[in-house]
Image (cartoon, helix red, strand yellow):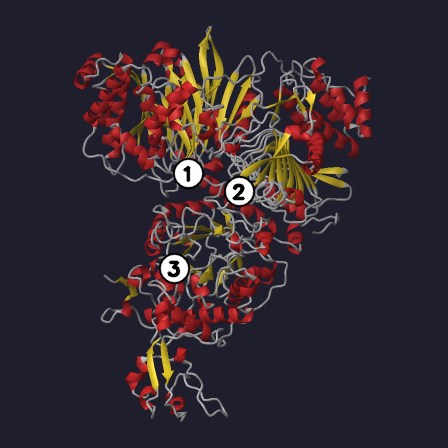
Amino acid sequence: MTTTTAIKSDLEIQEEALPQRPGHSDWPQEDIERKIRPVPERYRNAIGKYKIDRLAKCISCGRCVEVCGYGVHVKPEGYALMSRPQDYLCIGPACTEAGSDCISQCPQKALVMSLNPNVECFGDPRWSSDLILSTWHEAETGHTPPSHLEFRHGASGGGFDQIRFKFEIPGLDGGGSRVAAEAIDTGLDLNRREDGRPQIHIDIPVYGGGMSFGSVSIHTILAKARAAVAWNSFSCTGEGGYPDRLMPYDDHMITQVATGLFGVREETIQRVRIVEFKYAQGAKPGLGGHLLGDKNTPAVARMRGAVPGNALFSPFPFHSVYSVEDHKKHLDWIKEVNPRCLVSVKVSTPTDVDMVAVGSYYAGAHIIHLDGSYGGTGAAPDIAKKNIAMPIEFAIPKVHKFLVAEGIREKITLIASGGIRTAYDALKAIALGADGVVIGTAEMVALGCVRCACCESGRGCPRGIASTDPELMDLMGLEWATQRLINLQNAWHEQMIGVLSRLGVSSIRELRGRSDVLCYLE
Amino acid sequence: MIDGNNNVNEIAERLLATRSQIYSGRDLRLPKAAEEGGCGVTGFACTVPLAGRFIYEPSVQMQNRGNGKGGGIAAVGLTPEQMGVPREVLNDYYLLQIALLDPACHAELERKYILPNFEVALSTRQPHIDDYRDLPGLEVCPPDVHRYIVRVKTEVLKKFAEQTGLGSLSPRDLEDEFIWRNSYSLNDEFYTSLGEKRAFVLSHGRDLLVFKMVGYAEQNVEYYQLQDFKAHAWIAHQRYPTKGRVWHPGGAHPFVGVNEALVHNGDFANYYSVCEYLKQRNIRQQFLTDTEVSVQLFDLWDRVYKYPLEYIIEALAPTTELDFDQLPPEKQTIYRQIQATHMHASPDGPWFFIIARSQPDKGKVQLLGITDTAMLRPQVFALSDDGEVQIGLICSEKQAIDATLRSLAREDPRFCPVADKYWNARGGSSTDGGAFIFSVDSQNGGKKLTCTDKFGRPVALDSGTVRCDLGVVQVYDKNTADPLKELVNQWLQKGNVESLFTYAMDLPSWSAGDLQRFCKLVVRGADNAKSRSTAIEVLTMLHDRRFYTGDKRGATVIRVAEDALEELLDGAPLFGEPVSRFWRRVNWATRDRLAGPRAGEEILIIDAQGFPPEGDDCDAVLLRKAYQAGWKRFIVYRLRGQRFHGAGLGAETNDVRIDLYGSNGDYTASGMDGLQICIHGNAQDQVAQIAKSGRLVIHGDVGQTFMYGAKGGEVYVLGNAAGRPLINAVGRPRVVINGTCLDFLAESFMAGDPLAGGGFVILNGVEFDQRGRMKPQQAPYPGSNLFSLASGGAIYIRDPRRQVVERQLNGGVFSDLSDKDWRLIRPYLVENERLFGIKIQDLLTVDGEVKAPHEVYRKVGAVKLSILASSKK
């Protein structure tokens, strides 16, 4: 801070000149290029949907290399023998049907294709193995997966999986005339209150959910932040404090004020453009955050000021907020601390979520963030997961309509999260009434998560994504992770443009609340 | 059960059963009409009737606790002249007050529900201002209010007794029940059953009126022109319904039973369970709010079951845990019965009730405040006794109590703007039961106010003291020689705070006006940087310190000091006025002229009056801007509940100091990181939340969730902390609390190892007697939960009698105080002594004997709980 006692008459000028201005980072901000580059799987044998076995009778004639259009077969220069098939690239029976496939063209009939048994071992109805594989594909290539992978929805038999765009159903009319892709705008303004606080524009209707330092590794956190920079969107610190290494990305970080208040300091509130109040998590409404003792390593404990090795529970709810007038006071406080920030209120979806949303608007929130029950990691207890709050696809229209009836829909940004796995989920949420979505698990999958649900235990994640163990953390490099997330977002963006174009809508904002373009599968 | 009289039970059951006669159709299980956690509540009861404009002040002060979508007030203990009927009529008749949402239905309503049933002593329309739009912000036209002063016709009552078989009820009870049912039926026809609501009963008790509207509470006073309308007790409620559009005030508080009106802050988690309980007793809902069922419970237990107040409070807020065990055995027997019978009707969740009730047959008016057992809503009680007039106040915020007293004192010199006593109730406790009752009784032709807790134990007051804030003091003349003036000036010029304060400690021997004269001399004598700073310091000490005041009433000493400070600070030049070294002042009118400090200007004085409590124009924002412009020292005075002081200054503020005078608001010092804040008086809720470093001194009590999530800081509290202090605190906060806490101190405390740089709390558990001498409180820590689930840090508790027991801890363990521990905490006690005059010597003295530290202090440390431990060994 300046210590001068000289005469200052113009406060406004003074404020502009200050090095530490709330709502601005005083750290040089790093720019990350929004460029798509292929990033292969970081494990040696990537998992695909199909398996190609090369039998001993192969004569290495190289015919398969010629016929395969997907790069499955490789005969390295100067080698006499074929490499092991890169079968994760194989598109399966769709290829055999065409007749120009390696299986039928092999003169020795030395190639055998089968469904990869690995694939049956991972995934679950919500995150089907197809979805996991397509997310990997999207993260690897930056583009929409080939048709052998169902990348739009899972197989849970409920939620977004039972909702389709009408145009996906043969025989149903899908909407207006196509709009040229380049004319389509997927951007979103987040401040709709006209309250004198800055406008914040994001280029895609998606930003990253809160994951604390402690729950995931620093590489995961940084990669999320960097991808957010590339896409001019946001990522969120969660409640475990604000690692210094995030400072070059301050302008694209949301910092969380959650019930444990871990790591919440004035300077961290002041350096960001959006502050999020986490009242509840859709995966475990009625419970606070919970970091098991094992994950509370010395580094995590230092960040939070706690005792290493002890489980850290965040209370539910805020001890200082037991009512809506307390809530307003709470928001007023953060707004006083950072006069330029926008305020987001994250709540789960109880039956009266519509009233909560209206209450939050009147309390001064810019963003109301509904977190539905499909999300959540291994750290949420099974008893809570998916069993408590209202399904998000029900909560969104309920809140949307209530806000419309109240006459304030145009003054608040409604964000949905909790089980947004794909671009199609995001688009459905928007068509149901949200302005945009927050994703969490999808980014973890893009980084190689296999949904083993061991996030909370022991040293945490076997793939080093949700671990603070120094050894496991290093399983994943920062550049690699960043590019995977940038790619994922590009694939989603392509799909969004495609759907909007198909619907004859030139802006994502026009899709909001257009539940008429959807149908529900009985 | 209660008095062994089976007859009471039978009658009660019959009474409830026959209510079916008025129910039409099926009891539909309807959802709650709106969620409303929020609200601000306030109330006062006084020995003299007070005008409605005095309920206006605290309501305005707590506007930010409502959203203008529901505000209501109740007046109890009315004056016959204003009601237009003789005293006897006012005592014996019911005041049936009806809100006509659709005035066209009046004739029909009267024909059906009034004329056939009642002898009407008076039928009158409540006057109101011509156009509601003249009240800024009022969007919905308030209902016309029609009032009937009535008694049930004899033959109607007789017939009622026959039809219901309730002839054995006392005539008054029978009539009460008739009134209740008549209103129920009226509401049913004109309100509940309709899509378009047309009319409902606001109140129907004796000597009690309710007004409510879609607006703020105080707008009732303005719209219905109640500014001069007098009553012994008033309560008010600011509603914050989250339901969007509200077009009629049916859901606003207060709600009535018969002779009581209830306002409520909070909400229940078990609304349906309570409704189910009521349904089993044949009681149905019409307005579908928590508050309606609350008053139904009260009415049931009071009027139908005839429980004494103590048992009603027990049924609402049951005594549990350690507190239950501390009750005498005979109470335990009864309470166990009450809990077994009514536990599922006990409202679960955060709630605080204020109830005003009339008991005209006993010549009595009562005001009650009852808190939930976890004390999740803010609540402050206060008592002021002038000998001539007495007033008891209950409120969500202390600052609103101060606002009431201030507005009273402005008009009526019998009132003092500072109360004699402020305190909190400890919910569901064996000590006060979480409830206090102010009763205004008729006595020898006059009125007398008493205050008791749930158990009927009186709250004591200094009596027989004189005021030292009255009378015109001889204004000193510049030219006359005055030895005291010389002395004071000399001390001021030398910066001799000690001598000035010591001189003032002769106060007990002074006459009433001497203190004012002394303070005036100090104010007038302060004419340069040094003397001004000395004057501020000595007046502040007079204001903050607890000392023997002799026959002078303590509250008035504080008032004199505060007035003198305000006069002194008013002397600082505003921006735009000629330069004066040392200080500069800014107020609401000149806020836009704020500029950085000029050479020699050290302190920015902020006159907070007129600033809004929050938002871009609040004085805390102004302070932040001033800090950014280069100011480091701040004095904020005439605070009227403004919030957030010290918040938003960011990190590295070690050279900043802020002094707060007046009624400071919530969230003071929240997020402080380096700076020093001194609160001169009681602090409110959410103080020093997430504080990281710096120093906070509170010359009084502090409210709820003090230092929640704090990371550090050095904090000294002269008085008590309310519920949940230091909860979830981490890092290295170091706190001295000289009083005690309501409960849940340092839950989930994670502040490392105190002997290796971690945090701790020193809890002294002392208070001051009337002579300003320190004495131990009844128990150093009365709550059932101390240091629960804590994993780090420590509590050092002054407990020479080993009163705190193992079972109060859940995750903590007692250990003896080691020399290392004493070396650690001693410097903080030294500073505590310097700040508050609480001597270490006195703290170590037990029964007149100085003991070793380890005999007096005990340490509560963390024990590794399996639930918190990691899976590794």
- B656 relative position to B530: left or right: left
Point out residue B54 in the picture as x, y percentages from the top left corner: 49, 24
Q: Chain of mark 2?
A: B
Which residue type does callout 3 highlight? Gly
- From what the image shows, is residue A91 above or below residue A339? below
- On residue B444, the disc is none
Q: Quadrant of residue B553?
A: top right
Which residue type does callout 1 highlight? Gly
Q: Are marks 2 and 1 on the same chain?
A: yes
Mark nearest the camera among 1 and 3 is 3
- B237 relative position to B419: left or right: left
Q: Are marks 2 and 3 in contact (CB under 8 Å)?
A: no
List the residue tagged with mark 1.
B37
List the residue tagged with mark 3.
A419
Which residue type does callout 2 highlight? Ser
Dot 3, how many residues are within 10 Å of its Cα: few (below 14), some (14-19), or many (20+)?
many
Front position in the image: B703 or B566 = B703
List the residue tagged with mark 2.
B748
